[in-house]
Image (cartoon, rainbow, N blue to C red):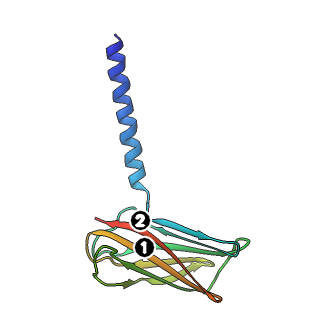
Amino acid sequence: MKVKWGIVLLLLCMLAALIWFRQARAHPVAEARYADEQIRMEIQAVQAVARPMKETAFQVVLTQWPEVPISDADLALNITMPDMFCGVFAAEIVESEPGVYNAIAMPVMKGQWQAEAILRWEDRHITVRTLFTVR
C-alpha cells in the first residue's frame, strides 16, 4: 500500500514540475534593469519566442526619480550575436506612451543573441543588455 502512494506522489510531483517548466518557458526571459538615484531603465522582450528572419519586439521603459517618465529620449537598441560576428542590427524605436519605447529588430539566424539598449541622457550613457535565444 505504501508503494502505491509513493508512486502516486512521485507522479504528481513530476506532473507539477512539468507544468511549472512549461509556464516558465512561456514567459519572456529576456529582461534586464538599471537603476540609480536618478534614473531607471528596463528592457524586456515582448514575445516569448524569437524566430530567425522574423521581427522581434522589445519594450524599454525609462523613468526619472520619482517615477517621472522620460519622453523623447535619445535611445538606441541593437541586437548582436555575442559568440559570433554576424553584424550589429539596429532596431526601429517608437515611443508608444511617455517613457515607454517599443523596439523592433530582426535576428537573422538561430542561436544566442544580445539586445543592448543605450540611453544618452544629460552627460551620461547608460547601457542595459539582455540575452535572448532565437529558435
67 relative to 118 in the view: left or right: right
**SS at badge 2:** loop
What x and y, as percent, mark residue 42? Answer: 56, 70
What x and y, as percent, mark residue 72? Answer: 61, 87
Residue linked to disc 2:
47
The residue most toward the left is 109
Q: Which residue type does callout 1 highlight? A: Ala
Give residue 106's quadrant in the image: bottom left
**Mark toward the start of the polypeptide (1 vs 2):** 2
Q: Which residue type does callout 2 highlight? A: Gln
Of residues 104 and 121, the one drawn nearer to the viewer in this rendering: 121
Q: Quadrant of the N terminus?
A: top left
Label of residue 109 in the image: none
What x and y, as percent, mark residue 130? Answer: 45, 69
48 relative to 66 in the view: left or right: left
Q: Residue at x 63, y 79 (%)?
A: 98
Q: Residue at x 42, y 74 (%)?
A: 115
Residue linked to disc 1:
57
What x and y, as percent, mark residue 111? Answer: 28, 68
Q: CA distance from mark 1 to mark 2?
A: 7 Å
The residue most toward the top is 1
Q: Are marks 1 and 2 in contact (CB under 8 Å)?
A: yes
Few, some or many C-alpha atoms within 10 Å of disc 1 (few <14, some 14-19, many ≥20)?
some
Few, some or many C-alpha atoms within 10 Å of disc 2 (few <14, some 14-19, many ≥20)?
some
**SS at badge 1:** strand
135 relative to 92 in the view: left or right: left
**Would residue 73 be visible to someone looking at this image?**
no
Total labels: the figure holds 2
Q: Residue at x 42, y 51 (%)?
A: 24
